[in-house]
Amino acid sequence: MKRLDLFGLLKKDMNFIEEELYRSIDSTEPLINDTSLHLLKAGGKRLRPVFVLLGGKFGEYDLDKLKHIAVPLELIHSASLVHDDVIDDAEMRRGQPTVKSKWDNRVAMYTGDYIYARALSMVAELPSPDIHRVLSKALVQMSIGEMEQIRDFFNVDQSVRNYLLRIRRKTALLIAVSCQLGAMAAGARERVNSLLYSYGYNVGMAFQIQDDLLDLCGTEKKIGKPPGSDMRQGNITLPVIYALKQPELRDDLLAEIGRIQDGDGQGDARKAVDMIKKSEGITKAEILADRYIKKALNALDLLPDVKTKKTLRDIAHFVTRRSY
């Protein structure tokens, strides 16, 4: 399912946001211009700006105002991916070479910093302390989530609770505040803002769980990287945590993960992936993702009846059905 098929209601406005994204990172410095453009041209689902615009539909919709949130939130997400690729030593993302692999780690880190700075300078054009406060708190939590992920690399004894706290900070919060800030910028009522935050948070949790499932069950052509990439990078995800709880699998799976770790993350993950795919881990993770989607839909039901609700409902269903 293509992005514009799903979000056809916003096609014109999303084309405008896409143009603003490219305009926002324009630089007179050739290298940083090249690296930033390389990142944006790799594409992406652009879910965060879509959520901003949809949140704005619950108030006085003003695209010129909403762009100061929609563009920065996508830039913040993109910058975090550049930094992630350095930490994970990732060679490919979305089927394209990463900034760190095409240039080097130093260039990638400064590219991420530049994109963060451009995002913050654009948000600063909105004279709303409440918006700045919500966004700054989310960025703090995102940073903590990144540190937690590094701390838990190859930690095979982490709990489901620790995993959920980590993805809350790394993924769900930014999607939640995308929905919330779009509504805030449009002057929606506080209860609407709160319900949209709840919707976005639960969709974000399901989105990340589905990402982790696709890393194991997807094809390289679909996901743009070899299956098992998370494990090779030391990221122990929910299906793996569940699989490790099965006594008949644990020792063999631990041995395979150990071989991957001993190979500095370059080991062959195929055996481990096959074991996890045959375990209860896949089904249990799918069940949890569905629970989060149900919570998102419950929040959606309490929102005012506007046309946008159907699109938000379609997105929620899309999240757990997607194959990329």
Image (cartoon, grey):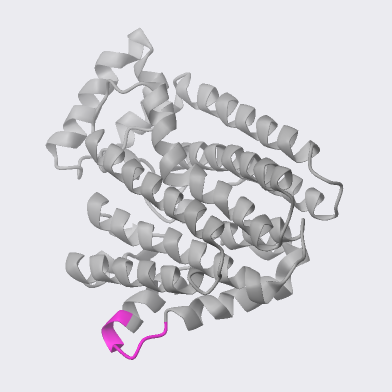
The image quarter in which residue 118 lies: bottom left
As rendered, which of 263 and 75 lies closer to the eye?
75
The image quarter in which residue 29 lies: bottom left
Q: Is residue 88 above or below residue 99?
A: above
Left or right: where does residue 127 sit relative to residue 273?
A: right
Left or right: where does residue 298 sit relative to residue 144?
A: right
Q: Is residue 196 magenta?
A: no
Q: Which residues are magenta?
A: 26-32
The image quarter in which residue 2 lies: bottom right
Q: Is residue 17 above or below residue 173?
A: below
As rendered, which of 133 and 144 lies closer to the eye?
133
Q: Residue at x 45, y 72 (%)?
A: 40
Q: Is residue 127 above or below residue 288?
A: below
Residue furthest toward the bottom?
28
Left or right: where does residue 102 sit relative to residue 219?
A: left
Q: Residue at x 55, y 69 (%)?
A: 127
